[in-house]
Image (cartoon, grey):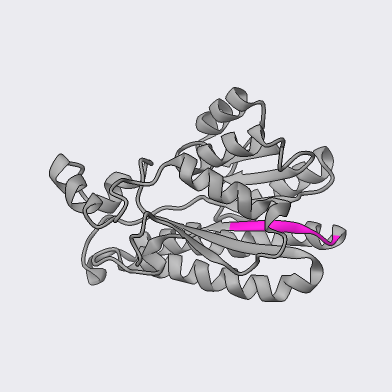
Amino acid sequence: MRLARKTAIVTGGGSGFGEGIVKKFVKEGAMVIVVDINADAAKRVAEQHGCMAFQADVSKMADWQALAEIVRKTSKHIDILVNNAGITHLPQPMDEVSEEEFDRVMAVNAKSVFLSAKTIVPMMKEVGSGAILNVASTAGVSPRPNLNWYNASKGWMITATKAMAVELAPLGIRVNAINPVAGETPLLQSFMGEDTPEIRAKFISTIPLGRFSTPEDMANAACFLCSDEASMITGVALDVDGGRCI
């Protein structure tokens, strides 16, 4: 029960890595708010694990403000924020990605972190404690061709994590990131462009441990970094990638 009596927000909690994190956090004693743009997905996960569901587009300030208001009314504080929601554009040359695709990737992957800082960080400042976890990617460490602007958004998130950590440390707030390698999530096909046994085998061949990451892998790392066991760890971008970035 490493997260007993803690309140957590997990964005993108309706599927994939986010759902795995929700499941782990609840098991470890946290009260979790499952945030997802897909209301049905958020409700499904919340009902399955005894959580609260909240439908939101994390790229919209109004949605973050509404979420912060819900937190103040129900829990009065927030201990953990997991910025997990993310999207990508399909693999293609950088100059062929549309402006609309670029704007959406940056809004969901980068602007959402800014908006969460505007609305949730002040609540953590009020109590002088908190843990923030940004789910970045190995793409921000070892960029892959034809995913240029997704790579850039995750590189931005890693740098933002370190900058946030330095600024918020004196206020008792820790900020870390995890860098997953591709896993069995709704984004997998988008990363690969086409989901075939051959393409999967080629991708897995670049991972020394020889498999995709799982929601459980991410959840275990997230739980540690958000728990008091990691009270001396801030500003870290932890590769959870089976050796992909070695």
Q: Nearer the viewer, residue 28 or 156?
A: 28
* Residue 12 in view in this figure: no
In reply to whether residue 99 is colored magenta, the answer given is no
Q: Which residues are magenta?
A: 128-133
Residue lying at 33% horizontally and 46% vertically, measured from the top left? 212
Q: Nearer the viewer, residue 10 or 6?
A: 6
Task: Left or right? Give the position of 138 relative to 210.
Answer: right
Expressed as whole percent of the image width and height from the top left, the position of residue 127 reads: 86, 58
Expressed as whole percent of the image width and height from the top left, the position of residue 156 reads: 48, 71
Residue lying at 13% horizontally and 45% vertically, measured from the top left? 198
Farthest left residue in view: 198
Expressed as whole percent of the image width and height from the top left, the position of residue 96 reads: 22, 66
Q: Nearer the viewer, residue 195 or 88?
A: 195
On screen, 105 above or below 165?
Answer: above
Task: Left or right? Give the position of 196 relative to 108.
Answer: left
Q: How many numbered discs, if any?
A: 0
Expressed as whole percent of the image width and height from the top left, the position of residue 188 reads: 32, 46
Residue lying at 65% horizontally and 58% vertically, measured from the top left? 132
Residue lying at 66% horizontally and 45% vertically, measured from the top left? 9
Q: Nearer the viewer, residue 157 or 59?
A: 157
